[in-house]
Every structure is written in structure tokens, then in C-alpha cells.
Image: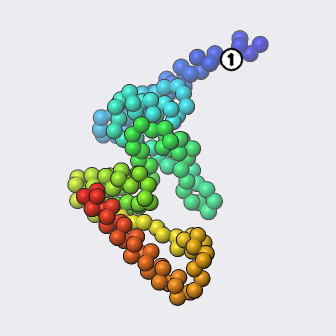
Amino acid sequence: FLRRVLPSGEEVAALAIAEADRRLHEFAGSVEGQFVCESRTGTAPQVIADIAKGREADLIVVGEHGSGRRGRSLLGTTAERVLACAPVPVLIAREMPHAAPAAVLTPLDGSPTDGRVLGWGRLLHERYGTRVVACHAVDVMEVYRRVRTISAAARMREMESQFRTNAESWIRERLQEAR
């Protein structure tokens, strides 16, 4: 009975696309630069991934969204899902920097992504002279939990020093491998 009163799904989609196109073109006209505007129907992460493939994008820039308890900023579900399905690297935008980054932190965790993380650091260094700081977080308490057979406090302090030395050596090796 509502079909006579409400527009069809196709009509609603066409209206939504027309409005999105209008807003995109209005925005593009308000800022400097070259913009191509495109609107499609579908889930946001998949549409973003499809457009990135179709337009041969090298990078997707998506804004963070939302806030959690105590005003702490969180990634929105769209940003999280884009990260999961993106065919290219994704940059999460918090705020626009005023200049090229002077220093970039490249956390390493021993995973296969370390090379890519260092690759981005190298690119920024080569392009802008950015200082690259590599780091690795060692949760000593977690290591202690896993190594319960060691109980003497003096041995714990010695192990902490060894962990730090080994982590620094490991980072230097990763940096040498990544040039």
C-alpha cells in the first residue's frame, strides 16, 4: 500500500547520488586543486575500495571518526573496514599538518608489515628529509609472565637490560635491511 506513496528504492538511490554529487562538486569548487567527483551506491568500504581500484589510486586518505570514553578518539567503523579491504595503503587523517613531517615514528613488531612500514619511512625521508624513528615496544611484564621459572629480582633487572639491548640490536638490523 505504501508503493503508491513512497518512491522506489531506485528513485531513493538516484536522489541520494544526486545530492552527494551536488555536495562533492560544491566542496571541490571551494578548495584549490584538481578534484574528480564520483558517487556510487553500496557499502562505503567496498565502494571506496572499488573506486581506488578503478581510478588506480596509490593511496586512500580517510578521516578518523568518533570518540569513545573520556573523549579519546577512535577509528570509525568505515575507516576500520576500509583498512581491512583496501587494495592500497590507507592514511588515517586526524588533522592537516602545516608542513611536511619533520619526524615520523615507525613502530616495528616483527611482522611481515615491518618492511612496508620502513618503506614509508624511507619514502618520507627521501622526499622531505624526514627523520625516521624506529621503535619496538617490549612489554617486560608480559615476558615475565611467559618466563615464570625466573624469579630472582636481580635476574629480572638483568633480563630487562638484555631485552632492551636485544631490541635495539634487532631494530638496527631491520633498519640496515631496509637501508
Q: Which residue is drawn at 45% across and 38% down?
A: 86
Q: Which residue is drawn at 40% across and 70% down?
A: 167
Which residue, as the protein is rendered here, is positioned at the far bottom?
154
Decide if residue 54 is on the left or right side of residue 99: right
Visible residue check, residue 178: yes
Image location (x, y in percent) of residue 115: 35, 53
* Residue 54 lies in quadrant: top left
Q: In which quarter of the image is the C terminus?
A: bottom left
**Residue 168 sits above or below residue 99 on the image:** below
What amino acid is at disc 1? Leu
Is 65 placed left or right of 31 in the picture? right
Badge 1 element: loop
Q: Residue furthest right?
A: 1
Q: How crowded is mark 1: few (under 14 residues within 10 Å), some or many (20 or more)?
A: few
Q: Residue at x 64, y 16 (%)?
A: 7
Q: Can residue 100 be seen in this view?
A: no
Residue found at x 47% / y 46%: 63
How was the colour assigned to the protein in this rendering? rainbow
Residue 16 image position (x, y, % from top left): 54, 25
Circle 1 sits on which residue? 6
**Residue at the front extreme?**
149
Give the total of numbered labels: 1
For the N terminus, the image quarter is: top right
* Residue 151 point in image, percent of width and height: 60, 82
Q: In this view, does 94 lie above or below 54?
A: below
Q: Position of residue 146 (x, y in %)?
A: 58, 70
Instruction: Give the farthest residue toward the top.
Output: 4
